[in-house]
């Protein structure tokens, strides 16, 4: 959500903390209602990530200590295979 905008009508009451940059570049923490991705992005109109973007994100995600929902990294690997034309992608 952009700085200065308000949550959509009927958004959930659960809140998450986001970092926003104001016009002067200062960080601000703001409590905003959580919104699922389909509420923010038109998934049918969105362009898929490029092979380079997917490979970079996947590589960083695999090296990180971040936890992802089960199957997320496998889905990224599958997407990378689809956009590169490879059957199997091993990072």
Image (tube, grey):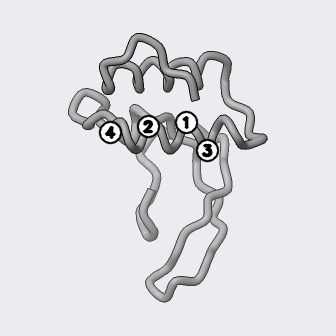
Residue 51 in the image, given as x and y percentages of width and height: 36, 36
Using the image, tell me which numbered label, if any, was put on residue 60. 3
Q: Work out how far the residue at label 3 is from the one at label 2, CA to CA, in angstroms.
A: 10 Å
Q: Work out how far the residue at label 2 is from the one at label 1, CA to CA, in angstroms.
A: 6 Å
Q: Nearest the camera: 36 or 60? A: 60
Looking at the image, residue 1 lies above or below residue 43: below
Among numbered discs 3 and 2, the one appearing first in the sequence: 2
Among numbered discs 4 and 1, the one appearing first in the sequence: 4
Residue 30 in the image, given as x and y percentages of width and height: 63, 64
Binning the other alpha carbons within 10 Å of mark 3 as few (below 14), some (14 to 19) or many (20 upward) gives few
The quarter of the rendered structure image containing the C terminus is top right
Q: Work out how far the residue at label 4 is from the one at label 1, CA to CA, in angstroms.
A: 12 Å
Kindly indicate the quadrant of the structure image that contains residue 48.
top left
Question: Viewed as shown, does residue 46 lie left or right of 53?
Answer: left
Determine whether label 2 and label 4 are within 8 Å by CB.
Answer: yes
Q: Which residue is mark 4?
A: 50
Which SS class for mark 1?
Answer: helix
């Amino acid at each position: 959500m952009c700085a200065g905008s308000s949550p959509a009508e009927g958004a959930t009451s659960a809140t998450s903390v986001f970092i926003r940059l104001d016009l002067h570049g200062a960080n601000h923490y703001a409590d905003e209602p959580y919104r699922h991705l389909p509420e923010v992005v038109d998934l049918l109109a969105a362009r898929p990530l490029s092979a380079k973007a997917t490979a970079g994100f996947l590589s960083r995600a695999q090296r990180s200590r971040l936890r992802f929902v089960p199957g997320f990294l496998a889905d990224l690997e599958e997407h990378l295979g689809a956009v590169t034309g490879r059957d199997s992608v091993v990072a």
